[in-house]
Amino acid sequence: MNTCKCSKAEFGRERSETLSAQPEGTGLVTIEHEPIIGETPQATLQSWLTPNPLFYIRNHYSIPESVSQWELALDGNVDNALSLTLTDFRSFPIQTLPITLECAGNNRSDLEPQVPGNPFQNGAISTAIWAGVPLRHLLERAGISKGSVEVLFEGFDIGEPAPGEGTQPYLRSLPIDVATHPDTLLAYEMNGEPLSREHGYPIRLIVPGWYGMASVKWLRRISVLQEPFEGFFQTDRYIVEGDDGEPVPVAQMHVKSLISWPESNAQLSMQSHMINGMAWSGFAHIAKVEISDDGGETWHEADLVGPRYRYSWQQWHFAWSPKSAGHYTLVARATDEDGNTQPLETRWNSLGYIINGVRPVRVEVN
Ligand SMILES: Nc1nc2c(c(=O)[nH]1)N[C@H]1C(S)=C(S)[C@@H](COP(=O)(O)O)O[C@H]1N2
Ligand SMILES: [Mo]
């Protein structure tokens, strides 16, 4: 019996047309329209790779107008300053890596008491295969001079970060050892496609393992510094208070997991269900994920499944057979190979960063 009117090939074409007809960002859960900020929908968090149109977007300023005559300056404390075109980039070595980006403010809306800032749920995280040139290759070409401590990255986007701060580009720096790490990329491709405007066309920085704020989009200038950079997004934002009250910069992603399925308030039947989700850490591979169906009283180890890479999240699943009808509180807890375990409670901080406490998912079985 042939009830389908379309051949497989036609179906494929139809699908790709639907996908490309969708402007980037429209399938996201909108947090803000201008500048555009959106998170990945819950249903898409089941996919190890995030489709480009559903990759979360976080911008501080409006997306810069399309950059004609783009050139990237590499200057500062270097032996030979460089000016690079896109054609130059095509002649450099290419490195391709699957890398998870998580916004430092992901899950901010879970904090109690509430804090200001984008009220993200758990979708300010996505994974793509990034391709580009190791930054180190260009820094070696330019030659880092003696006395250098950091590398500063400037985006083409400009605005006033807070009232009274004055108009300035998005600026972030990295310590020299992170900048020269072989996996720190100047990326121009995302899942096999050129970067879209939303995600930093033509070139962006990708700092594997770090929260998203480090991965500067729309790069215009890279400068080697002899002093630590103290700009707004380095010292006023993306810091948390340490135990001694001193500000600690936000850097690597802390160990964390999420339950992709089931969703909160799901009604489930009395049978076996495959609970699934993701786990990640900027410090090391994931060692284990544990699941509890009683809000954290007892724990059971989940199976780690799918691809296993250093900088991308780890998929996991757990076959769960509820013993009786009723309400359950499911929680997942990840541990990485450095021995870091996801805390049961997030450490509250006033700017709402590094929110990695376990997140209960309440379901009803009947
Ligand atoms: N130039 C520039 N780069 C930027 C930002 C920005 O506002 N401007 N936002 C940063 C933050 S906070 C995050 S979480 C990531 C988000 O990258 P995405 O929008 O491609 O997901 O970009 C980072 N790079
Ligand atoms: Mo972010």
Image (cartoon, rainbow, N blue to C red):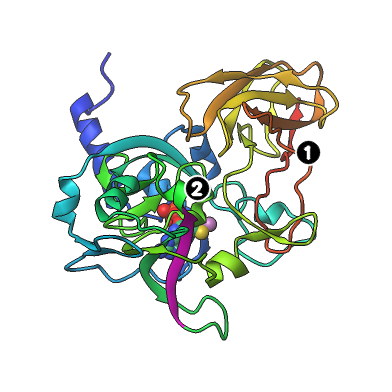
Q: Where is residue 232 in the image (x, y as percent from the top left)?
A: 55, 72
Q: Where is residue 25 in the image (x, y as percent from the top left)?
A: 40, 55
Whether residue 218 appears in magenta in the rendering, the answer is no
Q: Name the residue under label 2.
A: 40
Is residue 321 depicted above or below 75 in this figure? Answer: above
Is residue 189 depicted above or below 120 in this figure? Answer: above
User: What residue do we see at 54% from left, 50% from top?
Assistant: 211
Mark linked to residue 344: 1
Q: In which quarter of the image is residue 196?
A: bottom left
Query: How far, Cα to Cα, is label 2 from label 1?
Result: 24 Å
- The furthest residue to the right: 297
What span is in magenta? Answer: 167-175
User: What residue do we see at 22% from left, 25% from top?
Assistant: 8
Q: Is mark 2 on a helix, strand or loop?
A: loop
Q: Position of residue 359 (x, y in %)?
A: 71, 40
Q: Which amino acid, by three-letter code, is at mark 2?
A: Thr
